[in-house]
Image (cartoon, rainbow, N blue to C red):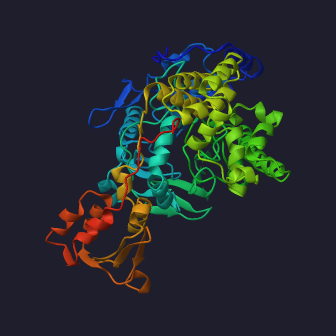
């Protein structure tokens, strides 16, 4: 099954643990298997989905190996989840609501209106979104897209928009709905820290791992992310309050705003005429992240639980089905009430118990080890940590309230990893002695300790081949035992890079289309993040841009900080250089599609002052590194 020829088999302790999981987990509960196949209408005839340029962006057949029995190298609970999530095709939720599942990390939902179809959450890239829409039309007719709705600000819920509508459609009146604050958060998350997030997302989703029993088997929430270009068309209609009702193409929708839950800007949708409830990503068939491993703002489980209670009170009495932007629906009022209540209790319990224990003086690591979920929740498959985990979610709650510092002054001013590792290895008797003892721990099945200790050898001596090999082997075993799909992918990606070098960033979210959606303020901020502070300490440059038809803006580089000021007030200071230009020309300069020399040579650009200062200012910007080291210093 696996193409990972470097991978070792499962060690005895991991194999035993995985077999034991088969015995104590409720595999006789097959309701999810029935629900995941309910309403199946068909799937694509070709496995490989391609972008317009012919490049492959998704392979529907990549997870065919999951039809076999679970091997020792995969946690059986994760194998079960991945098998369910890998099911692909068009499914009827209720008459009038359809979902394409398994064509990307997320689902695309299509709601039929009087003339056409409303598309909810058009996947990650245009290629998979277009293929999903084509599959729908093959079964339900060639209906036009009469509206698009983004449920929240994560890229897998808007990135494929250009696969279902074009700018011309929107200009002609096709509305794009989104929760208030969507654009700000969609852009800031994917640009300001986008390079680091995308690099870590390569680990989280295992994009470079071979698919198979010793490689990538899924990510819990979905299988992985598609690799096509990410797009973004800004919303034309904001949802600003709970209870707001909108009708698109005859489809009546009642909205519930849920900011600060799974995303900073998110909403749930009730379709009263269809007795259906869309829970976006606020209630899915797993424990979600309170802090995703790729990095993000810490989410608020207290607020998340309260919004789930509100959704139960507002909508479940008039709903016969609940569906979401990942996984499969839940049918029946009693079942969906129980499902939402258990999801609510899940996040509330993690929040409240973490706070209880931190107020007893426990640290984040101690709480993560001590936390146990109530048996009733543990017995429900949809509360399992396939994507989020109890361990890293409790640490996220701790971080939200108390930050990185655990209060112990010994941890207040620690050496950075490489310097500390050199000292640790010397204290422990040198690299050879550390590796000798670590191999004993490996043979004993204590892989968690192996990776903690051998990490010091690698950070003290990244070229130590024996340490890299042992660390890769230990990462691999921890991955084999993980119920959490993203933990497995992190461990196996670490092993892959130790053996073969960096895999880089397979999917970049800061695409040209996303960058084009930045406001000018966001563009100025994105430049400020790139200033090489120490190199710019002595620079003092002020440039005034007079934007035709807009407000003037002053950029000043001083004390290693790039500030921007709208207008020409005292904070702007006296400009060294003034440039009059149109906004598109300024955007081209800030996005890097034209250089300062080329810009200043344009006939429609007027320059007053020392023209070389523009290149000087921009020359203090550094470039982010999409290939930075993760498992080595």
**In this rendering, position of residue 504 left or right of residue 461:** left
Residue 44 against residue 235 in the figure, above or below: above
For residue 472, what is the image quadrant? top right
Q: Which residue lies furthest to the right in this view?
A: 360
Q: Which residue lies furthest to the left in this view?
A: 603
In front of the other: 609 or 281: 609
Instruction: Give the percent coordinates (x, y) of residue 114.
Output: 44, 49
Instruction: Give the percent coordinates (x, y) of residue 439.
Output: 65, 19
Q: Which residue lies furthest to the bottom in this view?
A: 570
Residue 609 against residue 31 in the figure, above or below: below
In front of the other: 212 or 28: 212
Instruction: Give the percent coordinates (x, y) of residue 597.
Output: 19, 64
For residue 124, what is the image quadrant? top left
**In this rendering, position of residue 384 left or right of residue 230:** right
In front of the other: 630 or 331: 630
Query: Looking at the image, how many numbered discs can be counted on the residues?
Result: 0
**In this rendering, position of residue 150 left or right of residue 34:** left
Residue 555 visible in the picture: yes
Instruction: Give the percent coordinates (x, y) of residue 27.
Output: 71, 20
In front of the other: 260 or 112: 260
For residue 386, what is the image quadrant? top right
Residue 119 visible in the picture: no
């Amino acid at each position: 099954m696996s193409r990972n020829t470097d991978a070792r088999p499962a060690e005895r302790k991991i194999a035993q643990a995985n077999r034991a999981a088969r015995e104590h987990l409720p595999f006789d509960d097959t309701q999810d298997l029935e629900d995941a196949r309910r309403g199946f209408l068909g799937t694509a005839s070709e496995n490989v989905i391609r972008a317009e340029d012919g490049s492959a962006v998704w392979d529907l057949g990549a997870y065919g190996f999951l039809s076999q029995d679970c091997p020792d190298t995969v946690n059986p609970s994760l194998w079960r989840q991945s098998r369910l999530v890998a099911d692909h095709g068009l499914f009827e939720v209720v008459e009038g609501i359809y979902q394409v599942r398994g064509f990307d990390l997320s689902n695309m939902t299509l709601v039929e209106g009087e003339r056409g179809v409303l598309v909810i959450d058009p996947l990650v890239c245009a290629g998979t979104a277009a293929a999903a829409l084509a599959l729908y039309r093959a079964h339900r007719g060639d209906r036009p897209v009469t509206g698009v709705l983004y449920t929240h600000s994560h890229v897998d819920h808007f990135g494929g928009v250009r696969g279902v509508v074009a700018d011309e459609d929107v200009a002609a009146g096709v509305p794009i709905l989104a929760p208030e604050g969507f654009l700000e958060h969609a852009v800031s998350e994917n640009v300001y820290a986008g390079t680091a997030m995308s690099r870590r997302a390569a680990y989280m989703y295992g994009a470079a791992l071979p698919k198979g029993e010793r490689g990538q088997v899924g990510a819990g929430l979905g299988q992985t992310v598609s690799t096509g270009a990410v797009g973004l068309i800004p919303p034309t209609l904001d949802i600003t309050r709970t209870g707001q009702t909108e009708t698109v193409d005859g489809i009546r929708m009642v909205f519930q705003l849920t900011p600060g839950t799974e995303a900073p800007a998110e909403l749930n949708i009730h379709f009263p005429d269809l007795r259906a409830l869309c829970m976006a990503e606020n209630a899915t068939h797993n424990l979600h992240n309170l802090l995703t491993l790729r990095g993000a703002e810490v989410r608020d489980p207290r607020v998340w639980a309260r919004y789930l209670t509100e959704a139960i009170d507002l909508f479940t009495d008039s709903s016969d089905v609940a569906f979401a932007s990942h996984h499969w629906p839940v049918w029946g009022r009693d079942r969906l009430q129980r499902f939402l209540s258990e999801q609510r209790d899940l996040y509330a319990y993690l929040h409240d118990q973490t706070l209880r224990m931190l107020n007893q003086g426990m640290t984040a690591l101690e709480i993560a080890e001590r936390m146990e979920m109530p048996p009733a929740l543990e017995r429900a498959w949809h509360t399992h940590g396939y994507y989020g985990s109890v361990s890293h979610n409790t640490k996220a709650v701790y971080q939200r309230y108390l930050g990185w510092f655990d209060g112990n002054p010994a941890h207040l001013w620690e050496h950075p990893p490489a310097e500390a590792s050199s000292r640790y290895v010397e204290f422990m008797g040198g690299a050879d002695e550390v590796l000798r003892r670590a191999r004993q721990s490996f043979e004993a099945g204590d892989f968690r300790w192996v990776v903690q200790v051998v990490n010091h050898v690698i950070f003290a001596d990244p070229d130590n081949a024996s340490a890299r090999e042992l660390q890769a082997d230990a990462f691999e075993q921890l991955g084999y035992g993980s119920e959490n799909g993203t933990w497995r992918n992190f461990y196996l990606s670490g092993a892959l890079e130790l053996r073969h070098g960096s895999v880089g960033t397979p999917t970049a979210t800061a695409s040209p289309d996303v960058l084009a959606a930045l406001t000018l303020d966001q563009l100025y901020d994105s430049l400020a993040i790139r200033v090489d502070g120490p190199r710019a300490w002595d620079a003092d440059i002020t440039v005034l841009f007079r934007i035709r038809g807009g407000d003037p803006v002053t950029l000043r580089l001083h004390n290693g900080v790039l500030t921007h000021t709208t207008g020409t007030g005292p904070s702007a200071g006296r400009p060294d250089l003034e440039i009059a230009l149109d906004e598109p020309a300024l955007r081209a300069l800030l996005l890097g599609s034209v250089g300062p020399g080329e810009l200043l040579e344009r006939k429609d650009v007027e320059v007053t002052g020392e023209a070389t200062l523009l290149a000087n200012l921009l020359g203090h910007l550094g470039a982010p590194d999409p290939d930075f080291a993760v498992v080595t210093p």
